[in-house]
Image (tube, helix red, strand yellow):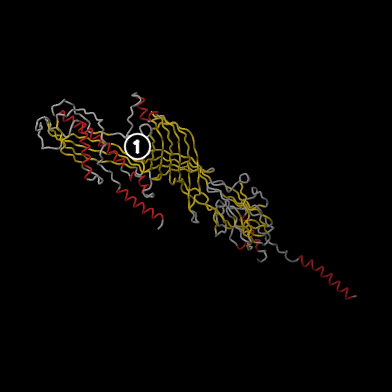
Amino acid sequence: MRPPLLILIASLLAGLLLATGCAPARLVVPLRSAGTSSRSVDLQHVQLELCSFTITNRSPKDGPEALAPMQAAFEDSLRQAGGGVEPCGTPVEAGAYTLDRARRRIQVRAHLIPSEQTSRTYFLDALAIYPFSGLFPLTPAWGRTTVSAKARLHGLDTPVPPIELQVSAPFSMVFYSWYRTAPIEKAYRRTYQTLFQALSQRIARHIEAGTGGRDRSIDEPTEIRLRGEGARIVTEAPSQAPVSEHLLWTYLSAAGGVEVSKTGGWASVRSRARSDFGVQETVGSGKATASGYRIALFKPPHRTGFFFPPRLGFFSQEITISGFRQALPQFRIPGTINIAAVASDPATGLAVDANAPIAYDLKLRSGYVGQSAGFNLVFGTDSVRLFSSMQLGLNLFEMRHSRVRIAQSETQGFSTALLQSGQFTAQLGLEIPALHMAIRSAFEFEWFRAFDYPDPVEFQGSVAFNPEKEVFERQRVFVDGASLYTFNWQVSALYVF
Amino acid sequence: MDILRILRLIAGAMMLAVPLSCASGEAPPVEPNGVLLIVNASQFTFLELRFHQTPDYLSADNVLEGTEGMVPEAEALFYGDADWYVTYYRRKSQLEDVLAFTTATPIQMKSLRGQKLTIFDQSFRVEMGDYVDPKTTDFPIYGVPFPAQTSTTSASRRAQRTQIRTLGAVLPPS
């Protein structure tokens, strides 16, 4: 079996494996708070009965035995928030008391729905499946675990609407995310811990307010979004306070920062043709280099995610494309005499180099509109962030102008092109928000396929033996256009506003 | 003795008769120049074609008529004797300037000798060939088919062809 076929089969199996994926547990018992929770209300006068504790949308990994520890953890939270929790008794009416009328009876019914949302780069996952058959390590995944809770209280003086609370926590993985569930389960643990604590406190406050206690305002947010901790894939914007409220500073902050860059790059052009001898070859090529410095505004990416900017721009490149030098060998036939030719300029009679490659000065310009898709990956802590970006753009429509100049001749003309060019950019940087400093390096690859010449231009093919003439010659070939690509790089230091 | 005198008289009369008989006969035959069959086996059209006996081609005349030049695969004949350089003009490429390409060494031509000169993009090839009677070919003819003639140029070629036909009447049978 050929190796590529083996890789394909292995990749298919890996794809199936990854598609079925490792499911994380959704019932993850939170750590005990170790009594750190402050008891904000006193529920000594209340007999709190937990009559119902259900969790739906469980994972296949959550067995039937997983619920009891969760309920126990919730009861712990209720105890820490207010008081003891008793088994559920008979249904209660409003204002019900215990038999000894020593305490009010309040019944709690809680229902929880856990879920998680996961984002991926997809293109790295595709790369991991094929050709790496699931072995490619860099498969970042990030998202949030969310638990929605609804608690109903029975036995209060007046019926109150159910307490609703949604808590979410972020998680992220950089390597082998398809095979790992621990980061998600750890996020669930944080989520439940916060949810149980917050929900218990709200229940306690509602009971206190609904059993003739102090009049409290119970206007509380229904959603708590926990921020990431430690080194992670950053998925939320930084929460640091602005340096200044001044309008100018606000404006500059929106621009990001200012960067000083050392830049360099080159452009390369190439014409290919097929000769009468059936050889597809490069008959002309050229390269132009550039280097310099640049000062510009730049905003480093602050969170991970996709972005889809439109492309609208103008491109211009002046470059020389030339053929290549190749000596013509002599083919000797017995009984004949080969005589070399002496090339000269008929205007002066002076010798010239007839083998000098044909060279054209090109000026290629394009105005284009298109669409890009990009991806930012920001990894780090609140103190240090490593950011990288990739962006792929496709020019949907172009209006092109090309000029070809050689010796005393010049031709030029316009043409249009659909889906004939594109761009790929990437960057890698490091930002230290506390210092307002960042460094980055970036490169850009821009590619134009078949940039048409106004008229076909002549090049020479490689030396080939012409059996009909019994001579070595370089065939004249006429090409319609050239492919062009540019590669630019920069290394920058930034001050981030 | 008488017989000897008679023989001397007869011999003397014959010696006198020889110059008289020669004076009244035809002139000895003229040998035509050698011929060079020129074949454009290059990929280019020749804008000019020059034949010259020194390396300097600038003072030689272009033998091609009109503006079409000598297209690839076209053939022509050049008649001459002694050593001749051949120079052709062509563009280096479609849009570039015109260059001249000259044989590095002259081509030796001799009476009644036929040779073929194949011109490639950047070289020449000479091989022996048959003598071509200028009367029997439709190829363009350049040069001097016979020693008595003056050089043929593009301007005088039509007149030269007429002259060649006239001279052909006195040529020895080929």
Circle 1 sits on which residue?
A232
Image quarter for residue A415? top left
Q: How far across and how far down the image is residue B39, in percent?
A: 59, 57
Between A357 and B149, the one nearer to me in the picture: A357
Q: How far across and how far down the image is residue A395, in percent?
A: 38, 42
For the image shown, how many numbered marks are present on the structure? Answer: 1
Q: Residue A118: in sight, yes or no?
A: yes
Between A151 and A164, the one nearer to me in the picture: A151
Q: Residue furthest front?
A: A100
Horizontally, residue A276 falls left or right of residue A133, namely right
| Badge 1: chain ID | A
Between B156 and A477, the one nearer to me in the picture: A477
Q: How far across and how far down the image is residue A275, in percent?
A: 49, 54
Q: How far across and how far down the image is residue B165, in percent?
A: 63, 61
Image quarter for residue B159? bottom right
What amino acid type is highlighted by mark number 1? Arg
**Element type at marker 1?**
strand
Horizontally, residue B129 falls left or right of residue A2, namely right
